[in-house]
Amino acid sequence: DIQMTQSPSSMSVSLGDTVTITCRASQDVGIYVNWFQQKPGKSPRRMIYRATNLADGVPSRFSGSRSGSDYSLTISSLESEDVADYHCLQYDEYPRTFGGGTKLELK
Amino acid sequence: EVQLVETGGGLVQPGRSLKLSCVASGFTFNNYWMSWTRQAPGKGLEWVASITNSGGSTYYPDSVKGRFTISRDNAQNTLYLQMNSLRSEDTATYYCTRESTKGPYWGQGVMVTVSS
């Protein structure tokens, strides 16, 4: 199975920060990586698809990038509504596998 | 607007069965693969099952293979998850998802609690 190693698991942030979260894939997954935002009691919301594409309605301060087997989600100029959990997913092959999640908390 | 509405959750004893349903609207259901993904309380996300648009093929992780069955009724725009021999570790919120090359689109989820 493909492992998606997500880091950090938690992050203390301030409004206006630039935040980067990374997932490393244990095998080649090509471009088939999603990033999801999840707020308490809510279902995940797709933010990035195919590693670098912004999903519909997602603010342009969010971006996705890829360097080899490392996939990153960057939030520029963090706003209060961005404080949430973030998850990566590889959907290149079965079994689908998620990263362990990153919890953003305000300082 | 795409909508996925899950029902059928609740409290069930270990070893018993439960069947979840997901009614889809706002898109052509039989054009899409569908999946179930779950999230245990305070934990991460775990993919549970997927089914092709025709229903001809299904996929499961080892953790549920042989116990869970995904199926669909394209005439009723409905996805199902039959869960047998339930264990305490199956306690989770179960999400119905629509699959595409953009990845999954999520329903609101339904809670399943396995406890005596």
Image (cartoon, rainbow, N blue to C red):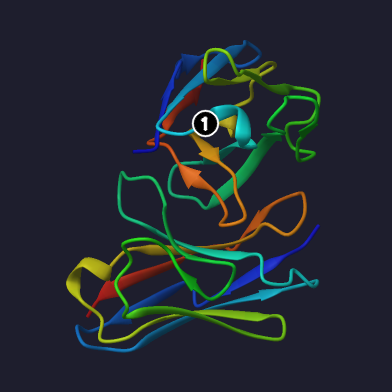
Q: If the image is split into quadrants, where does the N terminus of chain A sit?
A: bottom right
Give coordinates of residue A68: x percent, y percent. Answer: 71, 86
> Where B88 falls versus A46 (above or below)?
above
> Where B77 falls versus A91 (above or below)?
above
Q: Secondary structure at mark 1?
A: loop
Q: Which residue is mark 1?
A: B28
Give coordinates of residue B49: x percent, y percent. Answer: 68, 35
Q: What residue is rendered at 33% in x and 89% in y?
A: A18
Q: If the image is split into quadrants, where does the C terminus of chain A sit?
A: bottom left
> Where B49 falls versus A106 (above or below)?
above
State which chain disc 1 sits on.
B
Amino acid bearing label 1? Thr
Give coordinates of residue B102: x percent, y percent. Answer: 56, 57
In this picture, residue A2 sits left or right of residue B76: right
Q: What residue is rendered at 34% in x and 38% in y?
A: B1
> Where B102 falls versus B15 (above or below)?
below
Give coordinates of residue B69: x percent, y percent. Answer: 71, 21
Q: What residue is rendered at 60% in x and 49% in y?
A: B100
Q: What residue is rendered at 52% in x and 53% in y?
A: B44
Q: Around disc 1, counting alpha carbons within 10 Å, would you say few (fewer than 14), some (14 to 19), or many (20 or more)?
A: few
In this picture, residue A102 sits left or right of residue B81: left
Q: Quadrant of residue A98?
A: bottom right
Closest to the observer: A100 or B53?
Answer: B53
